[in-house]
Amino acid sequence: MRPIVVGQAVTKRFGDFVALKEIDIEVENGEVLCIIGPSGSGKSTLLRCINQLEKIDGGGLWVDGELTGYRIVGDKLHELDDNQIARQRLATGMVFQRFNLFPHMTALENVIEGPIQVLRRAPKESRDHAMELLGRVGLAHKADAYPIELSGGQQQRVAIARALAMRPRLMLFDEPTSALDPELVGEVLQVMRDLARSGMSMIVVTHELGFAREVANRVVFMDAGQIVETGAPEDILMNPRNERTQSFISAVLN
């Protein structure tokens, strides 16, 4: 099977600042790839480029075999319009640091909003699937609760269910536990473990090295907009070869 993500010489600039420097990356179907690295290393920017929340300035990105942001006609590239980009974006689900739930909607209403309004699914079908997903993340009993009535961990689990409701081929997680109190981190990571075991393709930006060691098929260490080192979790996290990776791992563990 073809990789779910292919990036070739992906470059992203913000003014004079180069956030991503000719990144080459592949993620296989069903693979869990964890990306680690210091703040400002380009980890979140890479996720946002894959999901087309940021437009790349060089190279190419393919998701599920489709070139993102452009179509090829003959030997020329033509930019996609907003509707075409929105269609491509449906292949990915993204969970952010902040939960971004609609405060005026219940957990159930948050989950069914996308399928009904964007995918034009029937309300009953959407509701049944949403209740199944809320059950999957352990929150079926909170279907009628509003975000303000939920803990941070519960809100993040609703956000995961909301992303899954769009039936994505790839899930992107941008430090999904960084805004949580320490005692709530475990419940979110458990949902992500279960999702990984189900075979979902996942790219996870995280500082949770224990989670990466347990769940990831591969770990990527990024610094200064570049991939410094990549390999199996035991190699990157336990025996990194690059000095920069070594110093980062040591600082996080200590």
Image (spheres, rainbow, N blue to C red):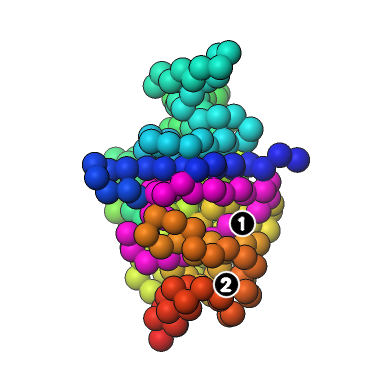
The vertical placement of 145 against 64, above or below, is: below
Tell me which residue sits at (32%, 59%) in the image: 40
Local SS, label 1: strand
Tell me which residue sits at (63%, 42%) in the image: 4
Label drawn at residue 32: 1
Q: Amino acid at mark 1?
A: Val
* Nearer to us: label 2 or label 1: 2
Residue 243 % position (x, y): 47, 76
The residue wearing badge 2 is 236
Q: CA distance from mark 2 to mark 1?
A: 15 Å
Tell me which residue sits at (56%, 49%) in the image: 25
Which image quarter holds the C terminus?
bottom left
Asked if the stretch drawn in magenta spans residue 249, the answer is no
Local SS, label 2: helix
Choose top left, top right, bottom left or bottom right for residue 56: top left
Other residues around mark 1 within 10 Å, as few (<14) / some (14–19) / many (≥20): many
Residue situated in front as seen by the camera: 147 or 161: 161
Residue 163 % position (x, y): 49, 43
Tell me which residue sits at (56%, 17%) in the image: 75
The vertical placement of 194 against 121, above or below, is: below
Residue 246 falls left or right of residue 53: right
- Give the magenta-colored segment's residue range: 20-48
